[in-house]
Amino acid sequence: MMPSLDTFPVPLIHINETNSTNNYLQSLCSEQKVEELTVIVADFQTSGRGQRGNSWESDPGKNLLFSTVIFPEFLEARRQFLISQIISLAIKEELDTYTSDISIKWPNDIYWKEKKICGMLIENDLMGRNINQSIAGIGININQEIFHSSAPNPVSLLQITGEEHDLFKILKNIMLRIQSYYSLLKKGETTSIACQYGESLFRREGMHQYKDANGEFLARIVCVEPEGRLILEDEKLTKRGYMFKEVEYLLK
């Protein structure tokens, strides 16, 4: 993948290999002034990380492995979940142009049916009550043919559609969508962002199996609160609230 810098909507740094695009961008931000929405994209990552400390499997040059940075000093730390929402929505909506059945699995995995096509890790630096810097590291399975790791349910866009796709084109469109959503966030249009996110949720309808510290249970999604808390309602009509990593979806 050799993108043309002239046609890319934001500053772009393309590297062959790094241990983590998040680490690379974090170091760059600490060393110099970096323009908002700058993208670091790598052909290969030696130790990409996910939300639960999981590694991300990717054959060199086959998938999108990138990080981007924003400086949302206007945003209170308690509303940081909005960053997760706008990036998830941007990726979901771009993948929607290639296939149906794309959804956002709370908090920010992107799924095709019951399989994971994208994961991300968002790292926020706080300054007082607000967010000083936010770096989002994103891995999207695009052209990988076979997955060799023990990850339970990966899928690529190639496996879904049966054809290879232009990595640069997808990245460019995702960044245009992130730009657009970030503009909405700056304008304070948080209700529309939250509504779009709610409508895009994986398993947003019907009863499904979950597991928490007390065991397995059947429940439906009621809503996601502004701070990111997932509200479920079980078979006894009891409401249950969970922050990240406190509940697990049981996949088919």
Image: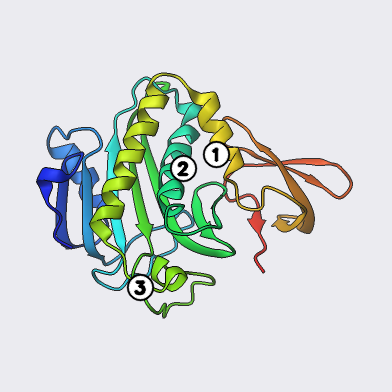
Residue 80 appears left or right of 207 = left
Q: Residue, x 48% and y 69% (percent of image)? A: 154
The image quarter in which residue 11 lies: top left
Q: Amino acid at mark 3?
A: Gln
What residue would you read off at disc 3? 144
Neighbour class for label 2 at 10 Å: few (<14), some, many (≥20)? many
Task: Please state which amino acid type lies under the numbered disc 1.
Answer: Tyr
Instruction: Tell me where residue 79 appears, x and y as whole percent.
Output: 49, 28
Q: Is residue 193 above or below residue 27?
A: above
Give coordinates of residue 105: x percent, y percent.
56, 52
For the point 64% across and 57% down, the residue is: 248
Q: CA distance from mark 3 to mark 1?
A: 27 Å
**Gap in Å between the C-alphas at discs 2 and 1?**
7 Å
Q: Secondary structure at mark 3?
A: loop
- The answer to whether any part of residue 134 appears in the image is no
Colour mapping used in the image: rainbow
Q: Which residue is mark 2?
A: 89
Label 3 vs 1, first from the N-terminus: 3
Residue at x-position 49% and y-position 57% = 52
Task: Identify residue for label 1.
Answer: 197
